[in-house]
Amino acid sequence: MMERPDRKRVTSWVVINTVVVLYAMIPVLWIASLSFKDPSTFTDGSFIPRKWTLDNYAGIFENDDFVRGLVNSIGIGLISTFVAIVFGTMAAYAIARLTFPGKRLLIGVSLLIAMFPQISLVSPLFQIERALGLFNTWPGLILPYITFALPLTIYTLSAFFREIPWELEKAAKMDGATPFQAFWQVIVPLAAPGMVTTAILAFIFCWNDFLFAISLTSSNAARTAPATISFFTGSTQFEDPTGSISAAAVVITIPIVIFVLFFQRRIVAGLTSGAVKG
Amino acid sequence: MTTPAPATRRALTEGQRSERRLGLWLCAPAALIMVLVTGWPIVYSVLLSLQRYDLRFPDDRAWVGLSNYAVVLTNEFWWSAFWVTLVITVISVSIELVLGMLLALAMYRAIVGRGLVRTVVLIPYGIVTVAAAYGWKYAWTPGTGWLAAMLPEGTAPLTDRVSAIAIIILAEVWKTTPFMALLLMAGMAVVPEELLRAASMDGATRWQGFAHVLLPLMKPAILVALLFRTLDAFRIFDNIYVLTNGSQNTASVSITAYHNLIGGLNLGIGNTMSVLILISVAIIAVVFIVGFGTAAPGSGR
């Protein structure tokens, strides 16, 4: 098991790792490089900026639409994630621990929704939301986001909940803990990591969405950042949108990179748990 | 889940009854939202697909039976979009399977820097698709891009159908291979290490161990990963929207439906396409589950 890796094998793994790192990082570094390029050097085709500037960043934060888009993205993402986690936790607890009719049906429906083509929902929702006055509002995006985040949260959380040694709660009560203490000091710490992971995955989903965001909005009242970026093209005060689009792309990527760096192990566990446990 | 053994039969039914009630109540909010936000719209979508309903001529609304379906199914742009979607789906999922397997092996077996590899791989997964797509778009734009700079003078790959589709596939593969790799790695992790060791003791080469021991045992995981990714690839939208917006006949079915709906404001035709896409996705899922015996996640114990 713990045999000393010889130098040749280590070298070949270093090469493989380098390839993987380059694969993942080059497209990201390229967009970052573009965002730091002085507009006069956009057309030099160089991977590394020849003339650095922060003007592109200054520009997008002076753009009210983009700032508003960021606020919308964060607000809509957090609310959708919160609701999906609360309802998803309740359902996942029931699925993992209780026997009741309709359990398989709920699992089946969640699976159907996870595989559902979003465009098939956009077409009717476009009309329904306009009739209900939800079009171009936060709830108009929050509702479909919760719906598509729920299958993810239910699957991931029920897989996590199956792993929790629930007998510990009983043991704590026998040792004299009150029911609340048993829950708060034993069960919550065991369940929290899974819930944090699931929340991150759900938030990434909402943060990433583009189709709902461009279809169900018509102004910066609810348009999220990815959708706002796509409207930079030709319709803003910037003459050439390349720099502002790149800078905005980097800004909306940063939260994801931070999540990934801090929670790598958990995210991998979360992404794979639902699929394998079956 | 096991419930404490009841003392009497009556206690059992009562305990079970309260457990059922709790279970249903706990699931009610999630189920209600999912059904309200998807169930009614699907029915409504089917109803709209049976009407002539163009928001530019709202007074001309009428029930037209299946004639929208006849219009769409005889339209060359729809079929172009359908084949483009199918080509993108088949090619990108095939490449992802091979690359994803290699990546999964690298993440699973790495003896140095395992954490590093597993971390950077999550960046393509997490990055906003639209942001990455702009990166690819500029990289291939003549004059701006570092990749376009390597091409012969005067080539504009995004303005030619075949090369544009190739770039769309590249963007899609780059972004989603890590997800495929993670699912495959999870499948690798459940294969007992002893089996591989036993095979190599019996004189199997590394390749034989992989092809005859690991792969067959990973089959369920591979099929689930393929199912997920195929359905996901079939609804491709973001990458195409940014890279070509469907020009040069590179539109996917989702892009075409979107253009008819939001651009054309034709609710009848847009919803007809939505229903057809839904039917296609259902067929793909049935083929996987019935044809290949893919275990639907959550169906087993």
Image (cartoon, rainbow, N blue to C red):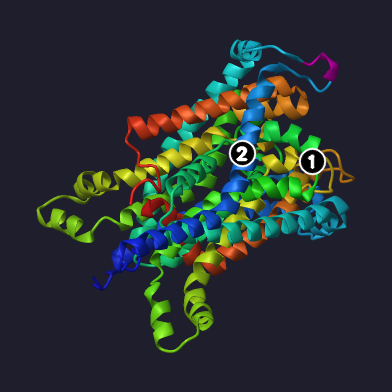
Provide the residue span drawn in magenta: B57-61
Query: Label 1, on which residue?
Result: A135
Q: Which of A36 and A250 is in front in this view?
A: A250
Q: Residues within 10 Å of mark 1 (few under 14, many from 20)?
A: many
Q: Does residue A172 appear left or right of residue A143 in this picture?
A: left
As shown in the figure, which amino acid type bears the numbered disc 2? Thr
As shown in the figure, which amino acid type bears the numbered disc 1? Phe
Q: Which residue is drawn at 78% across and 20% down?
A: B54
Q: How many numbered markers are drawn?
A: 2
Q: Nearer the viewer, residue B145 or A262?
A: A262
B70 shown above or below A227: above
Query: Label 2, on which residue?
Result: B38
Main SS of residues in magenta = helix
Q: In terms of secondary structure, where does tag 1 sit?
A: loop
Q: Does the magenta stretch include residue B58?
A: yes
Q: Which residue is drawn at 46% across and 41% down?
A: B228
Q: Nearer the viewer, residue A271 or B130?
A: A271
Q: Residue at x 69, y 29 (%)?
A: B258
Q: In terms of secondary structure, where does tag 2 sit?
A: helix
